Image: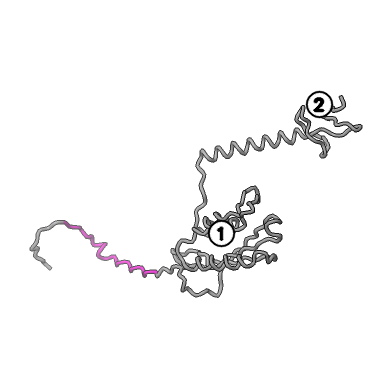
Amino acid sequence: MVKKIDSKIVGFKVKSQEQDAQPEAPAKPEVEVVHMHEDMPRPEKLLGTTYKLKTPEHISEHSLFITINDVVLNEGTEYEVRRPFEVFINSKSLEHYQWIVALTRIMSAVFRKGGDCTFLVEELRSVFDPRGGYWNKGKYVPSLIAEIGNVIEQHLTEIGMLGKPEVDEHQQAFLDAKKAELAAAQEEKEEDKGNFPPSATLCYKCHTKAVIVKDGCQTCLNCGDSKCG
């Protein structure tokens, strides 16, 4: 069939016979992406992870067990994500019962609201105990609530909502040097102890814990210094 061109040609494309014979690919059906929202009904089954939180006895006599249940959205599609849905905190101790129940209900409501809930981590970690914080596993914790925030951060990192903090090469080199320095100092300290009794005290002359009471007189087993001359 001959077709008359009445307008100016501004572009063209050559179509081969193979392209004419090739059938068009069917359009992919659009996937309805489901997002977390507060009206979402609770599924019958949720994936849960429980973390054991052991604190010093003056903070809590018994361990706290923090359980975070997640819901899987858009399962089996490229948009599949895992999001926190609810949180529970259990302990044998009833000392913190009231505020723990209030805290878990508020956090669960924030989780079900949807959107970015990672701000909870910094909010919890910024709470300071007026009685002072404590050390746990070599890390200073300003309060029990702040340590709960650390657990929430760990969980959100594991499910992909928070990225793992990266250390650049200069910071890593500095940390490695400090670790080596600390290890050398610890090794030197262990060598200084030698085979002296555990009850030995520090000698102010040779700076070694080797002073014992011998014949009623303080004597250093390392340098021989004695209070009795």
Which element is circle 1 on? helix
Q: Give the range drawn in magenta.
A: 11-31
Disc 1 to disc 2, C-alpha distance: 54 Å
For the point 51% across and 49% down, which residue is it? Answer: 165
For the point 43% across and 69% down, which residue is it? Answer: 34
Check disc 2 and report the residue beneath it: 223
Q: Quadrant of residue 17?
A: bottom left
Decide if residue 170 is in sight here. yes
Residue, far top: 229
Decide if residue 47 is in sight here. no
Q: Which of marks 1 and 2 is nearer the N terminus?
A: 1
- The spot of residue 212 in percent (x, y) is 85, 34
- The spot of residue 221 in percent (x, y) is 84, 30
Q: On the rendered structure, is 175 left or right of 37?
A: right
Q: Main secondary structure of the magenta part?
A: loop
Q: Quadrant of residue 8?
A: bottom left
For disc 2, the neighbor class at 10 Å (few under 14, some 14 to 19, many from 20) is: some
Nearer the observer, 64 or 160 = 64
> In the picture, which quadrant includes the C terminus?
top right
Please, what is the three-letter code of the amino acid marked with disc 1?
Ile
Q: Does the magenta stretch include residue 22?
A: yes
Which element is circle 2 on? loop
Check disc 1 and report the residue beneath it: 152
- The spot of residue 58 in percent (x, y) is 70, 56
